[in-house]
Amino acid sequence: MSRQVLGPFNRVEGDLEVTLETLDGRVSAAWVNSPLYRGFEQILQGKAPMDALTLVPRICGICSVSQSAAAAAALANLAGVTPPPNGERAGNLMLAAENLADHFTHFYLFFMPDFARDAYAAMPGFDAVRARFKAVAGSAAAEALPARARFLQVMGTLAGKWPHTLSLQPGGSARAILPAERVRLLSLLREFRGWLERHLYGDALEAVAALDSADALWAWFEAEGPARGDLARFLDLSQQLSLDTLGRCPERYLSFGNYPLGRARQLAPGVWDAAVGTVHPIDSRDIVEDLSHAWLAGSAERHHPLAGETHPDADKADAYTWCKAPRWRDKVVQCGALARQVVDAHPLARDLVAQGGGNVMSRVVGRLLEVARVLPMMETWVRELVPGEPFCVETVLPDTGVGIGLVEAARGALGHWLVVRNGRLQNYQIIAPTTWNFSPRDAAGTPGALEQALVGTPAGAAAGMPLAVQHVVRSFDPCMVCTVH
Amino acid sequence: MSLLCADSPNLMATLADGGVELLWHPSLSERSGEDVVTLLEDCIAGRQALDVLCVEGAVLRGPNGSGRFHMLAGTGRPMIEWVGALAARAQHVVAVGTCAAFGGVTAASFNPTDACGLQYDGDAAGGLLGADFRSGSGLPVINIAGCPTHPDWVVETLLALAMGEVAPDSLDALGRPRFYADHLVHHGCARNEFYEFKASAEKPSDLGCMMEHMGCKGTQAHADCNLRPWNGQGSCTNGGYACISCTEPGFEEPGHPFALTPKVGGIPIGLPTDMPKAWFVALAALSKSATPGRVRTNATADHLVVTPAIRKTVRK
C-alpha cells in the first residue's frame, strides 16, 4: 500500500488537494481536502440582510450569479414576495446564461485538454484530438473563448455585467428590458445556438435533446463518427478509454430544481434514488451539515443549516479539510447537471444512469444534454418578456424571520439559509454544490461522493498525478472557492 | 473568470501577439501537481525567468500569522510563503482584483482570515510585501483594482508591460493603472440627465439617478466603467444598480448598507469628487426646481413614460 498527496489541481476552480492510498495499482481510499478557508458565513453575520446581494456573488468569480440567485430567493422567501412574470424570466435568463457558459467553459477549457496530453500520444486519432483540445494552444480554446465572451454579452444587457451583478433582486430584476434589447438578446442566443450546432453537436439542439436512450446516443454517434463535432469526439474518447467505468459514486442524485415560472420549476426538484427508482420530494429539513472531519468547531457535530455554525479551528484533531459534510437523510448524494437531468426524468440521463451510474462519461454527457435543452428555454423566455410591464416588485423585509433559497448552479444544488433578528443577519449558512460532491467523511466514517468515486480508479505506475484520477476529479466540474465559502 | 470575457477576437492570440507567454494559469494551463510545483520552484531558484507575477485573491495571513487558511495544495506550504518567494524574483508584480490589491471583500467585517492585499492592507501601505517593496523593474505592485476587474484592464496592463511602457507615473497614488483609474464611473453614465436635474430613482428598476437614495458612488469612484462597456454594452449603472466604488480600498465596509445613500440633514454625505459642498447644495436645489416634467416622471419608472419633445434644431 502506498500513499500520495496530489495537488495543486489545475483547471478546477480554486484549491484542491487529494490524498490517495493505492493498492495493486488502484486507488483503495481517498481523502479530499479543500485547503482554503474564506470566511463568508462569518462576514455576513451582523450585516443588513440586503447587503447579502452585494457580498455573496463575490464568493466566486464563476458561480457569481448562482450565489446572487440563491440570496435573492432566500430574501424573497423571508419577505414573502414573488417576482412578476418579467422578473422571473429575466432572473432565469441570468442564471441560465451563467450555467450554460460554465458548462461550456468546463468542457472546452477544463476537461477536454487532459485528452490532448502527450501520455495519450499512442491513441488512434490523437493528432486530431491534440490539435483541437490542447490546453491554451488548441483550436477549440481559440474558438470557444470568443464564443463564450460573445454569449455572455447577454449579461451585459440583462444584468450590467458578469460576474457580480446586482440586477437580481428578491422582487425580480432591477434592469427592465426594452423592445430593441429583447431583439438583441434573441440574436445573441441565436448566434450561440449556431456555434453550438456547428462545432459542439454537429446537429440541431432539439435533435440532441431528443436522444432518449444510451442506444440512441450511440446510434447518433455511429451515424457520422467523431468528425461530427466535439461531443462526438468526446464520445469516441469515452469509448476508447471506457470513461463510463470511471468515477462511479452513490446512486442518489440531488436537484433543487431550476428556473421557476409561476409555481413550477422548469427542471423538476427532487432526490432520485436509483436503488428504489423513485424521486423523493425536497424537504430542506432532510439536510444536515456534519463537522466531524472539517477544521471547524461547533456546539454539536452536526446542524441543520438554519442552526449551522462556522468557527474555524485549524488544529482540530481528525479533521483534514475546510469543507463541511452535507448529508441528505444521513446519506451521501451527488449533484450537478446529470443529477438535474435524471431528477427531471430526461430519458437519456435516466438510461445512462441505469446502465453505468453517475460516471465520468455520464456526467459530461449530462452537462452537454443540459446545454441543448436549456438554450431553447432561454429563447422562449426572451420571447415572453413584455417590455413596459414590471420587472421588479418592491420588497419590504421583516425585522425578524428566516429565509431559504434553493437554486441550481452549474455544478449542482446551491442552498442559502438565513436568519434575521432585529433587522440584521444573525446567521447565514451556505451549502454549495461542491460541498456536497467533495465532502469529507462524516461522523459515521462514510466518505463523500468524490472520495467514493475515486476508489478503484487506476492509479498507474508512472510518477505524478494519475490521469484517470484527474478525469474523475474534473468530471464533477468542482468549484472549490464556493465549497469553502 | 472575468478576464475570459475579453472582447478581443481571441484572448490567447492577443496575449501571444503582444509577446506575452503564459507560463502558467490555474484555469487554462495543462500542468497540474508536481509539474506546477517544479515550475514555481524553478522561478524561485532563478532557473526560469518570471517577467510578470499575477496574483488573484486576497493574501490570507491567519490563523495567528501562520497562513494556514490558504495552503498551496500538494506542497504543505502556505500561499503567503509562495507569493513572497515568487514576488522576490518577479520583474513585475500585478495584483488582479481588489482582494489581491487591498484585501477587498475577503477582509470585510472582523476580517476572519486576516486577509490583506499584496502591498496594501485596506488603504494602508504595507500588506504582505511591505510598503517599500519594489519588483525587479523598480515598480511597486501594480494594483488592477476592481471587483470584478474589467477584462481589458488586465489585458491592456499586460500588453503595456510587455511593451515596456509602464512607468511610475503610469500608476496613481494607490498603484492603480491610470489609464482606467483617472476616470470617474460618472463619466459617460447613461443616467446623466437624471443626475443633472437630481431626478432620483427610489426603488430597484427605476431609471433615475441612484446617487440620492440608492447608494451610487459613481461621481466619486475611480474607473472608466461607463466609457468602456462591460460584456458588450453593460455597466453597473446600466444594469440598474449602484456603483459601490469597488476599485477603492475598504469598499467592502462602506459604513452603510450598500444600496442606501447615507445622508445628513437630507443631503448625501458623499459629494461628487472635487465639488465644494456649498455649491453642490445650491446647484442641487436649483436643478431640482428646474427638473423637466419628463425627467421627473421617467426617474421613477422602469421605462420611458414621457418621450423627449421633437424639436427642430436647424435654422431655417
Image (cartoon, coloured by chain):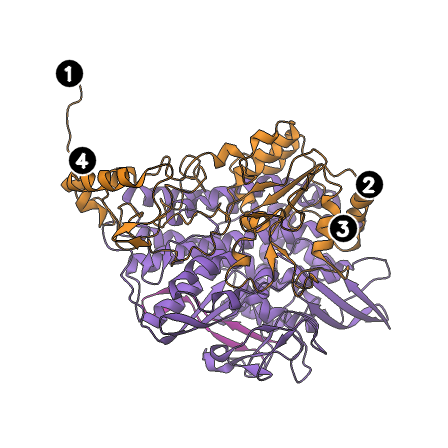
Question: What amino acid type is highlighted by mark number 2?
Answer: Gly
Label 3 vs 4, first from the N-terminus? 3
Residue A227, percent across and down? 63, 45
Q: Which residue is mark 1?
A: B315
Q: Which residue is mark 3?
A: B36
Q: Which residue is mark 2?
A: B46
Label 3 vs 2, first from the N-terminus? 3
Whether pointer 2 and pointer 4 mark residues with C-beta atoms closer than 8 Å, the reply is: no
Out of A370 and A203, give the one closest to the viewer: A370
* Picture quarter with the N terminus of chain A: bottom right
| Shade representing chain B | orange
Whether pointer 3 and pointer 1 mark residues with C-beta atoms closer than 8 Å, the reply is: no
Residue A92 seen in this snapshot: yes
Whether pointer 3 and pointer 2 mark residues with C-beta atoms closer than 8 Å, the reply is: no
Q: Label 1 vs label 4: CA separation?
A: 20 Å
Label 2 vs 4, first from the N-terminus? 2
Residue A315, percent across and down? 70, 74
Q: Determine whether, in the image, residue A297 is placed left or right of residue B305.
A: right
Q: Label 2 vs label 4: CA separation?
A: 65 Å
Q: Which residue is mark 4?
A: B308
| Shade representing chain A | purple
Please state the chain letter of the residue tagged with numbered disc 1 in the rendered image: B
- Element assignment for label 1: loop
Q: Label 1 vs label 2: CA separation?
A: 72 Å
Magenta stretch: give its range. A249-274
Please state the chain letter of the residue tagged with numbered disc 4 in the rendered image: B
Neighbour tally class for label 2: few under 14, some 14-19, many 20 plus, Cα within 10 Å: few
Asked if the stretch drawn in magenta spans residue A259, the answer is yes
Residue A65, percent across and down? 46, 57
